Image: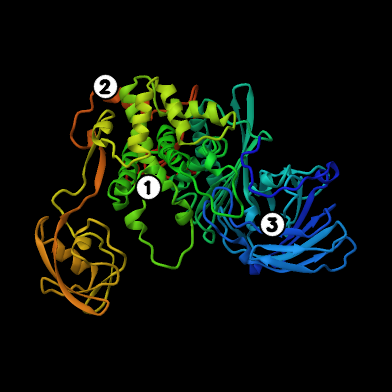
Amino acid sequence: MRTLTWLFVLCLASPSLAQSPVRYSISFENSAHHEAEVIATFSEVPAGPLEVRMSRTSPGRYALHEFAKNVYNVRAQDGSGASLNVVRANPHQWNIADHDGTVRVSYTLFGDRADGTYAGFDRTHAHMNIPATFMWARGLENRSVEVTFDIPDDSWRVASQLVPVPGKSNTYSARDLAYFIDSPTEISAFDMREWTVQSGSRSANIRLAVHHDGSQAVTDAYTSMVQAVVLEQQAVYGELPEYDYGEYTFIADYLPHVNGDGMEHRNSTILSSTGSLEQNPIGLLGTVAHEFFHCWNVERIRPRTLEPFSLEGANMSAELWFAEGFTSYYDDLTMKRAGILSLDRYASGLSRTLNSVLTAPGLRFAGPATMSQNATFVDAGVAIDVRNFQNTFVSYYSYGAVTGLALDLTIRQRFPGLSLDDFMRAVWLKHGVTEIPYDNNDLVVVLGEVTGDTDFAQSFFASHIFSNETADYESLLSQGGFLYRIAHSDSAWIGQQSFQFTDTTAVLDFSTKIGSPLYVAGLDRGDIIRSIDGAQVTSQEDLFVLISDYRPGDTMNIEYTSRGVDGTTALIVGEVPSIEVVPYEHAGLEVTSEMRVFRDRWLASRVQGAPIVLEKYCHTCGRTYPFENDHCKYDGAALNIVAPER
């Protein structure tokens, strides 16, 4: 089944038209200047103007990206090679009339951003997000597609969920435009690793294509980590999705000149980062865990608000707290269960996520469902005016993640033997396997069915999804022996501390946050602090030293200039609002047997049979450690993901 439907105006096509594929070719001779040359051939075109378009957005994105801005030198020919008149109807559409049934469109594409959204061409690779690369034609969306890549280097290969065409060199196919659009492609001298995963009576071939500057040994070590993530996430749902061609492909670019991103697709994902595969495997694996979880949650468990998905307009959804946020909750949970994260590192991750939500001023304005609808403005959306999102918005990623934490621990508390895993499996069976899109009310129904308590399901959603009530995280986390507490009690805090300093003043860099001492004192972005209690502040060090002499509740007298107007204000010093989550054993508290059982049921591996054992190595003394360790306990040396040569 197709994951996405598309918001197109379709014309009726005869059987002969449906059998005539759209053919593309793309070459990279000028890749040193980040250019590609594209030819799109549309055959057996119905009479009348052909409308050829570049997409304005892309699957997995919710804002507009206007890919047509990088297209130029657009020309067209008919079947005999005669030039055709091209009329640009709007910024992303070209109309071509008076053709003979064949229209061959050629254009130059500039691409210098290798990530999950755009295209990047250079001497090292051709990295393509399909909506950012290829034009398409109205009325021909149901046709199959063939694309031929003119590969400039014999060492380069193609990584994609597209299907190789037998007998045609470097030519790949898609069953229709929807599948083609959803098929990112990397062409480079990448490392490839493949393995088979059994899922009931089915098996799936998993491929990892890694374009990086590291060694083969590093690729092998990283492959084991990815394998562990795959198995833990399969255990959550009880099975792998039935991939359309029996194959799933991770496409990873870990290079200094790419841009960090991760983007899910039906049978593949794009991963990009400037991080080193050897030095920062945990950071990179967090994106792996997130994007692979999407092959269930969002690719097949599909929000109804994204159906049909529009390539020509922004896509708004009130379900991203679940599609993206619950997926984010499982990022670190998966890695903890796989033995990649230590207990301390997992607790630190909880601290960061909880802080990003619970200290956010925007929390007072709306719950996760409403915040999800702002994705069109924040999902790499571009604006040049000053926005107030630091005061009005909470990320649906983190908001959804802490809500997932609350629901998981609440289910475990109220319904012994059940967990969020059971809820995710039930949603998968009802809306993922069947690919019947859902909305928030459908999720309420499934939660009621899983717990056998409809009132609980409705109450939880009313309080924590449709409204902005905060869960009792202190009580919930204590079940697993985690202490939730204020991180810096009795420490002085004035709010935002991002300033530009001069020889005599400090200038506020960003808008102050609602409720912070600076905000309450009436200070905001661009205001010049001339003195605090008579003292000039000319460096960050000066500011830290000055604040350290105060205690919460003390008053500072501040002289300022705001857009040319001088003034004074009294600032009442506050307490640092950040919280932290600490395992009981590191806070000097007893971890009871009940807590250990709860913690194990929550955080231990769910893989049946023998899980993949991940290890790190000390190159100083040669000792081997579980992967979650960072340093050798004997000599303090940093541990390596690759075993030392013997």
Q: Position of residue 482 (x, y in %)?
A: 26, 34
- Label 2, label 1: how far apart the Cα atoms are: 35 Å
The answer, for residue 404, to whether it is visible in the render is yes
Most foreground residue, 409 or 571: 571
Mark drawn on residue 638: 1
Quarter occupied by residue 35: bottom right
Most foreground residue, 198 or 416: 416
* Crowd class of label 3 (few under 14; some 14 to 19; many from 20; radius 10 Å): many
* Crowd class of label 2 (few under 14; some 14 to 19; many from 20; radius 10 Å): few
Q: Which residue is at a point 31% across and 39% down the rendered structure image?
A: 347
**Residue 308 sits above or below residue 521 on the image:** above
Q: Mark 2 and mark 3 in contact (Cβ < 8 Å)? A: no
Outermost residue on the right side: it is 80
- Label 1, label 3: how far apart the Cα atoms are: 46 Å
* Crowd class of label 1 (few under 14; some 14 to 19; many from 20; radius 10 Å): some
Q: Which residue is mark 2?
A: 594
Quarter occupied by residue 592: top left
Of labels 3 and 2, earlier in sequence is: 3
The answer, for residue 646, to whether it is visible in the render is no
Q: Position of residue 324 (x, y in %)?
A: 46, 43
Q: Which residue is mark 3?
A: 134
Amino acid at dot 1: Ala
- Label 3, label 2: how far apart the Cα atoms are: 57 Å
Of labels 1 and 3, earlier in sequence is: 3
Q: Which residue is at a point 24% across and 45% down the rendered structure image?
A: 579
Q: Which residue is at a point 29% across and 68% down the rendered structure image?
A: 525
Q: Quadrant of the N terminus?
A: top right
**Residue 427 sits above or below residue 221 on the image:** above
SS at mark 1?
loop
Amino acid at dot 3: Phe
264 with respect to 561 (left or right): right
Coloring applied to the structure: rainbow
